[in-house]
Image (tube, rainbow, N blue to C red):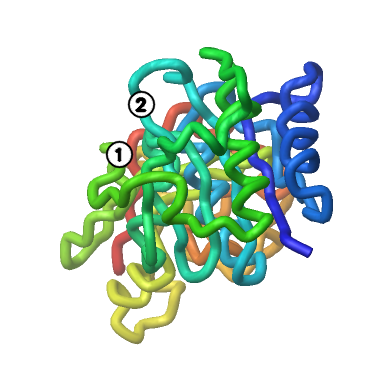
Amino acid sequence: MPIVTVTTDYGTHDHYAGALKGVILGIAPTAQIVDITHDIEPHNVLHGAFVLRYVLECFPAGTIHVVVVDPGVGTVRGVLAGRFAGRYVIAPDNGLITLVYREVAAEAIHVVEEDRFFLPRVSATFHGRDILAPVAGHLANGVDVGSFGRPIKAPKLLSTSLRAENKGKSIAGAVLHVDRFGTLITNIGADDIESLSAGSPKGTCGVFVNGARIGPIRGTFADVAVGEAVAVVGGCDLLEIAVNQGKASERFGPVDRIRIEVR
C-alpha cells in the first residue's frame, strides 16, 4: 500500500485539501494518505521547506511527499518530482526542496512536464489538484519518476541563509521556524555546537538572542523556572530558544541573530 503524505498552506476551511486528496485516490485507490499539515503559513515557502525536511525520513522508503506552497501558481515556475534517500517529493520548483536538497542525497530530480499525467483540464490557480495530485497518484501506481519529464540539475533554492556561520570562537545563526509553542528553531545544528565546544561541557556555551545573554544550553525546557527563557537542542538536532510554558516569539519579538559563544 503506497503512502502519500500531503503538506499544504490550504488550511481546512475550504475544499482545496480534500479535492487534492480525492484526485490522488481516484487514480491510486489503494494509497494511504497521511496529512502532515495544511497549516503552513500562507505563501511561506521556507515554512514548507522546513516541514518537508523534518518529516521526509520519518516515513519509510517509497513514501511520496506532496508539498504545495505555491505563491507563483500558474506562472512559468515549474513542478518537480524527485527521489531523495528512497523517498519521493512532488513540489513546485520554488525552493520548497531547499533543505532536503542540501542535506539528503538526491537520487533523481525531474521537471514535471508530461501532461498526459495531469487532469484533462488544468486550472491556472489549482495546480495542486490538477498537476501535483495526479502525478502523485501515478507515482503511487508504479510509474517511474523519470516518466514525468526531463532531469534537472539546478532546481530553485531559497537564498535565505540556512546554515549557521562558524566564526571560530562563536557561531552566528538565524531563526528558521517558529513553532506553535512560540519556540524559535534556529539553523544552528548540534554538530555546530559540538565543533565549537570542542569537548567542553554544554554549560560553557553562552547563548545570545539579539545581543542579550539567555544562559547556557540546557537539557530540556524544564531545566529553568516557568516563564524563564531557555536554550536547548531540540528534536530536529537544532538549537531552539524557548520560554518554559511561554512563548519565546513574544518574549523576544523579531529576532535578527542568534549567537553562541564559548565562555
All told, the count of numbered labels is: 2
From the image, tell me which residue sits under label 1. 156
Where residue 208 sits: x, y (%)?
Answer: 38, 49
Considering only order in the chain, which callout, 2 or 1, is on the residue closer to the N terminus? Answer: 2
Mark 2 Cα-neighbour bin, 10 Å: few <14, some 14–19, many ≥20: few
| Residue drawn at x 23%, y 55% as measured from the top left | 165
Looking at the picture, tell me which residue is in the foreground, 117 or 103: 117
User: Residue at horizontal 64%, vertical 37%?
Assistant: 133
Q: CA distance from mark 1 to mark 2?
A: 9 Å
Q: Quadrant of residue 248?
A: top right
Across and down, in percent, residue 215 comes to 47, 58
Towards the viewer: 162 or 169:
162
- Residue 262 lies, in percent from the top left, at 30, 68
Residue 107 higher or lower than 186, as above or below:
below
Measured along the vertical axis of the image, is residue 41 above or below residue 81?
above
Residue on which disc 2 sits: 77
Q: Nearer the viewer, residue 180 or 227?
A: 180
**Residue 88 in sight:** yes
The amino acid type, in three-letter code, at marker 2 is Arg
Q: Are marks 1 and 2 in contact (CB under 8 Å)?
A: yes
Secondary element at tag 1 = loop
What residue is drawn where x is 56% and y is 67%? 218
Q: Viewed as shown, does residue 94 lie left or right of 37?
A: left
Give the side of residue 26 with respect to residue 85, left or right.
right
- Which residue is drawn at the image coordinates 33% and 68% (left, top)? 192
